[in-house]
Amino acid sequence: MKKKIFALALALISILSLSACGKSAASAGPVKIATKPMTEQYILGEMLGLIIEDAGYEVEITKGIGGGTNNIHPAMEKGEFDLYPEYTSSGWVMVLKHDAASVDDATILDSLKSEYQEKFQMTWVGLYGFNNTYAVAVRNEVAQQYDLKTTSDLAAVAGELNFGGNPDYIERADGFSLLAETYGLEFKSVNDIDIGLKYQALQNGDIDVTNAFTTDAQLGNPAAGLVTLEDDLHLQVNYFCSTVVRQDALEKYPELEKALMKMDGLLSDSEMAHLNYLVEVEGADEKDVARDFLMEKGVLKG
């Protein structure tokens, strides 16, 4: 009889405990997520939302905030948002006002964490794995014809090739001119092409080389037949993606940090590019794309 009473008491305690946890998670209110106005961020915002919901919390996502970092960070400081996906060099340069080359990749996350904690009571949780930085892209047949694997390989054959890039890349000091100077590139021609048309021009053969971002949707398009060349002289600053989160949010939602760490090392450059392609080119819904990927990786269960 005593054993039955004891068992019933344990069961009651367990039920009350679960009920209290449920109420606690609900009463804490939604975790507020912000994203920048770009496909990649919409997908990442949905991934974060799904993972956080899976941890038992409500989620509120505000997508496509104009101005990106310049407007999201001040809103984070005011407590309007709890977290958002951010890129290491964006935080380092745009928020902390440091020189992009003043810290190496091995220490940048630790440096970002310590300075954000000290100045803003925020931190960075995990690194997603991909690096959305500048790259040089060529058609596959051009890469094969000239045996191009690295950007340095371009130097010997650039005089036979036409470069086309969006105007802001060609005009900015750390864009085309720095690329050409660093790698000794003198192209047959250099053309201004609208950012929305350059991949079409590349595929049509109007140009042979263009500037890209490593997670651009067209680089994830298997039918495009494009190749990115290795930045073997390490010219480009790295933009690794992570989650910036307010310290008080981590305290308010005890399971939040554990949930966010599920994004750590989850995505490669090519995987992120492919997800961008599914949304931008094939018209898939970003939440569906995010959920399918998380299920494929075993982060979410069916």
Image (cartoon, rainbow, N blue to C red):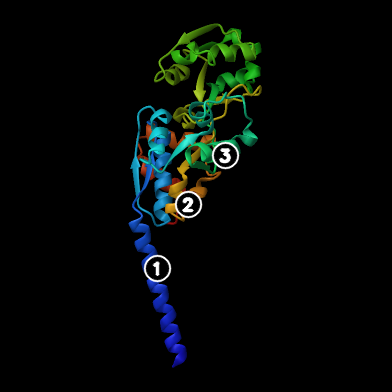
Q: Position of residue 181 (x, y in %)?
A: 61, 11
Q: Is residue 30 left or right of residue 171?
A: left
Q: Is residue 280 left or right of residue 113?
A: left
Q: Any mark on residue 114, and which?
A: 3
Mark 1: secondary structure: helix
**Residue 52 at x, y = what percent?**
42, 51
Position of the N terminus, as image quadrant, is: bottom left
Residue type, label 2: Ala
Which is nearer the N-term, disc 1 or disc 3? Answer: 1
Residue 14 lies, with reference to residue 204, above or below; the image says below
Q: Residues within 10 Å of mark 3 (few under 14, many from 20)?
A: some
**Residue sitting nearer the eye, 240 or 112:** 112
Q: Find the distance from the CA under tag 1 to the CA under tag 2.
A: 19 Å
Q: Quarter of the image for the C terminus: give it.
A: bottom left
Q: Amino acid at mark 1?
A: Leu
The amino acid pointed to by label 3 is: Ser
Q: Earlier in the sequence, mark 2 or mark 3?
A: 3
Count of numbered badges drawn on the protein: 3
Q: Residue 186, which numbered label?
A: none
Report the side of 100 relative to 16 (left or right).
Answer: right
Q: Residue at x 53, y 24 (%)?
A: 134
Which mark, residue 18?
A: 1
- Residue occupying the point 39% across, 78% down: 12
| Residue 105 vertical position relative to residue 146 in the rendered view, above or below | below
